[in-house]
Image (spheres, rainbow, N blue to C red):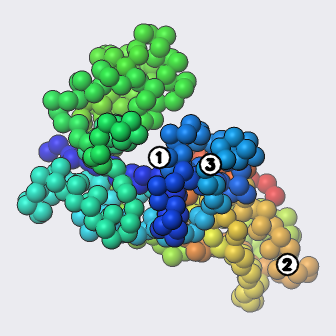
Amino acid sequence: MKRVIALVDCNNFFVSCERLLKPELIGKAVCVLSNNDGCVVSRSNEAKRMGIQMGAPYFIAKNQFKKITFLSGNLPFYCEISKRVMAKLLDFTPDVEVYSIDEAFLDLTGLRKTFNSSYEEIIERIVKEIKEEIGIDVSIGLSYSKVLSKLACDKVKTLQSKNITDSKTYKIGFREIQKELQETLISEIWGVGKNTTALLKKYFIQTAYDFTRQEDIWIKKNLGKVGLELKQELLGNSINPVKSVSEAPKSISRSESFKEFQTNKNYIQNELNGHIHRVCRKLREKDLLTGCIGVMLRTKDFQVTDIKINLVNPVNTEFELIEHAKDMLDKLYKKGVIYRSVGFYALKLTSKAIRQMSIFESESISKKENLSSSLDKLEEKFGKGIIKIGG
């Protein structure tokens, strides 16, 4: 059975959230700023028409665009509104995959009978109820794969920005796929980066349609499995299914008795680092972040001491947490005491999707997450424990 996939995208999300608190901003040019008021991360349509760019530095923009209202970001409030939107989507289908703080994929396959409506009518209803019940405008792209639904959503938002349509929805049906791909540059396709675009241009592949015309053997040789999956998604075959929402665990922990009783702090630290890595890997597997961590020490006589701290920013990278855990172990460790085990646990778990794609995230944390992901890939290829993390 062909899947029917929708992408729901909240329009100018941070600005829309601010307008819930300050209705007087409706119809005015508004921009929301990143952490520490560094740069523009959300623009109202009125601000876009003035020419201000996403990512514009605030110290320059405030002098260049004096008629725009600039607001400091309020991420906790935006996250709360996001949760309401995602909860509303679950009223329509259990198959909801939160992609970012303001986007989610829905699998609507087979729901026409449930709602006694066409798929187009279902997504129109979603738009209407989110606006009426939460106050947020959303755009929805509908098609047969994630890549095509993303293209459809981008299409309707482009048409809105040019005042060509007032519709909040757009469908790419089978009859429209070829035409849409012929009119879309390959660089505009979700997941196609600059390097891939440059490679394809060397072979005179300019549009998404050009790409789908290539032989599978050529695509596999140059782009591997990911390239083959992209081709199928562009042709309307759902290769990457919607991953349904599942209940996240309340905590993740790891502890293990030493091979021999220990008094050596360096040994204990290294064992702790290993536990942190395994907990973080589990967090990444489940796309979770931890907002609270703890370290536990158990003595030879089974006496347990522990300490926990709340983190300013939820993370899932060992390179961030080991720094905190070292300070915690320093406070727990007693010279001359014989220990039998050490443990690490992560609490206050939240979905990474809430922070994913958010410019509020610091560059430092982003780099550490990329490094952690590289570790995961190495372990997948060469086996767990191939790399040890030092103190």
Residue at point 46% right, 17% down?
200
Give percent across and percent down for residue 367: 69, 46
- On residue 331, which mark appears? 2
Q: Residue furthest right?
A: 335
- On residue 165, which mark appears? none
Question: Which element carries disc 1, helix, strand or loop?
Answer: helix
Give percent across and percent down for residue 339: 79, 79
Residue wearing tag 3: 67
Q: In which quadrant of the rendered image does the C terminus lie?
A: bottom right
The answer to whether marks 2 and 3 mark residues whose Cβ atoms lie closer than 8 Å is no
Q: Residues within 10 Å of mark 1 (few under 14, many from 20)?
A: some
- Specify the quadrant of the image occupied by residue 333: bottom right
Question: Which residue type does callout 3 highlight?
Answer: Lys
Residue wearing tag 1: 45
User: Which one is nearer the viewer's eye here, 306 or 32?
Assistant: 32
Question: Which residue type does callout 1 highlight?
Answer: Asn
Question: Which residue type does callout 2 highlight?
Answer: Lys
User: As drawn, is 137 to the left or to the right of 49?
Assistant: left
